[in-house]
Amino acid sequence: MYAWKSKSHTVGKPWGEETCWNAPWGTKGKIISIKQGHRTSLKYYAHKNECMHCLRGSAKVYVKTDSDEFCDRREGEYGIFEISEGDVMLIMTGVPYRFVADQDDCILLEIVSGPNNAKGVMLEDDYGRV
């Protein structure tokens, strides 16, 4: 195969929306729009890494970790990262995280590598989802 083409689809979320696409060989992506004053669920993926690029706005990223190695500051069991337009962040397999858009709307580009059927494990959710 020398090239590949597909269509994206948009899924509404209580905190915004995701425009998703899949590609061959375990690669897929999303454009994630988080509305100001909202946050995503606290979740992790057991079998994929995620690379996030902030396209517009800003967000706090809460990462459940016992390491202070890379975060901007700590709040209890979370390392806090402040991201804004142009920032790129990698979230490794098995690391719980959530995005909070408390200052303005945030738009992220997410590229993941791992099995296309890898499902997230939701730990907490503000909207009653399981």
Image (cartoon, rainbow, N blue to C red):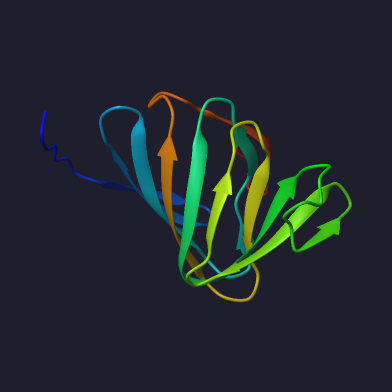
| Spot occupied by residue 75 in the image (x, y as percentages of width and height) | 85, 57
- Front one among 129 and 62: 62
* Residue at x-position 63% and y-position 68%: 37
**Residue 65 screen position, x and y as percent:** 78, 42
The image shows residue 109 at horizontal and vertical percentages of 41, 56
Q: Is residue 76 left or right of residue 73?
A: right
Q: Is residue 108 above or below residue 27?
A: below
Q: Name the residue: 63% across, 76% down.
A: 103
Q: Nearer the viewer, residue 129 or 68?
A: 68
Residue 84 appears left or right of 102: left
Q: Is residue 42 left or right of residue 47?
A: right
Q: How many marks?
A: 0
Q: Is residue 113 visible?
A: yes
Q: Position of residue 9 (x, y in %)?
A: 27, 46
Q: Using residue 63 as the reference point, say whether residue 27 is left or right of it.
A: left
Which quadrant holds the N terminus? top left
Q: Quadrant of the C terminus?
A: top right
Q: Is residue 130 visible?
A: no
Q: Residue at x 69, y 61 (%)?
A: 81
Q: Residue furthest right?
A: 76
User: Which residue is outermost to the left?
Assistant: 2
Q: Is residue 15 above or below residue 50?
A: below
